[in-house]
Amino acid sequence: MPQESLLREMLVILALFYGLIFGSFANVVGYRLPRGESVVWPGSHCPNCNRPLRAWELVPVLSWLALGGRCRTCKARISWRYPAIELATGAAFVLSAVTARDNLAQVGVWWAFWTYLASAVACDLTSLLLPNVLTLPAGLLFFLGSSLTGIRSWLLAATGAAVGYVIVAAIHLMTGGKMGMGDAKLNLAIGAMLGPGYMVMAFVLAAIYGVLAALPLRLAGRVKAQQLIPFAPFLALGAATCAFVGPDLWHLYADLTGL
């Protein structure tokens, strides 16, 4: 029993470590991909003064804290999204490792999925774009990963992807394009991983999260009327909610409504 506990603790530590690293990589993808830049070359540098960053400046979360959220040379502000995405990815890695530790293949697919969502969130936050080169291959990748590892059946993975795409595509048409089709393509992967039922739940939760976040900003005058806001963060949060506590939420909803 002590050995099993030790192994579990080691798994959590490794999951957090890799989650922070891949969250840091997602930030690179989010900044460079919408600009058509390589995500591997050149090395990390300050986007304001172009100074190459040293190794100690690239430690996830800790470097941001040590630098006070500013470039060491030019003092340009480093966005809060960098440590936030790193921490969120690390937390998702840990939760996936704990909940699916008996199936390492599924853990690997979930880790890849969270890295993808973190990259999409970073893209949307920096540019309000979700590039096709990111979303379209991911839809196929996670359809295969979900179905081959038994996260969802072939039918549920395919139906979930289709439902996720159609939901946003319909809203896109009904609103005259106010919701972008990038979100529909993002939902291909989310639906494949969650299946159709939880895909619908995730979208409803994303809408609720979006309203809860945007309303105070609107009242404070920080978000203008008709201003576009990134929706990928809320889709990712809805997906994470359903992935980790979806069944509990469904049972709670059923109890409250008498279904």
Image (tube, rainbow, N blue to C red):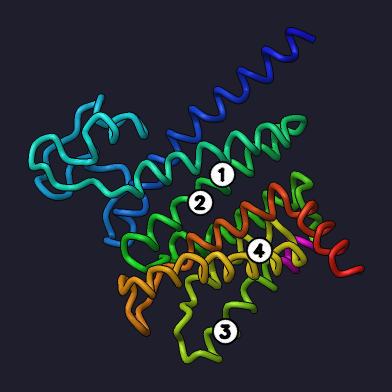
Report, in whole angstroms, how far the alpha carbon at label 4 lies from the one at label 3: 15 Å
Instruction: Tell me if label 3 and label 2 are in contact, CB under 8 Å.
Output: no
Q: Quadrant of residue 68?
A: top left
Q: Are marks 4 and 1 in contact (CB under 8 Å)?
A: no
Disc 1 vs disc 2: Cβ atoms closer than 8 Å? yes
Q: Residue at x 75, y 67 (%)?
A: 196
Q: Which residue is mark 4?
A: 202
Tell me the residue at 37%/76% (across/down): 228
Please name the residue that numbered disc 2 is placed on.
116
Q: What residue did someone put label 3 on? A: 171
Query: Which quadrant is home to the N terminus?
Result: top right
Q: Quadrant of the C terminus?
A: bottom right
| SS type, badge 4 | helix
* Numbered range of the magenta stretch: 156-160
Q: Nearer the viewer, mark 3 or mark 2?
A: 3
Using the numbered discs, state the Cα–Cα distance from disc 4 to disc 1 in whole angstroms.
Answer: 19 Å
Q: Earlier in the sequence, mark 1 or mark 3?
A: 1
Question: Where does residue 153 sit, x and y in percent of width and height?
Answer: 81, 55
- Neighbourhood count class around disc 4 (C-alpha, 10 Å): few under 14, some 14–19, many 20 upward: many
Residue behind mark 1? 112
* Residue 71 sits above or below residue 209 on the image: above
> Horizontally, is 60 left or right of 91 in the view?
left
- Camera-near label (2 vs 4) is 4
Left of 50 or right of it: where is 138? right
Say what secondary structure mark 2 lies in: helix
For the residues labelled 1 and 2, the Cα–Cα distance comes to 6 Å
Could you tell me the amino acid type at mark 2? Tyr
Q: Position of residue 47 (x, y in %)?
A: 17, 49
> Which dot, 4 or 1, sits closer to the camera?
4
Q: Earlier in the sequence, mark 4 or mark 3?
A: 3
Alpha carbon separation for disc pair 2 and 4: 17 Å
Q: Amino acid at mark 1?
A: Ala
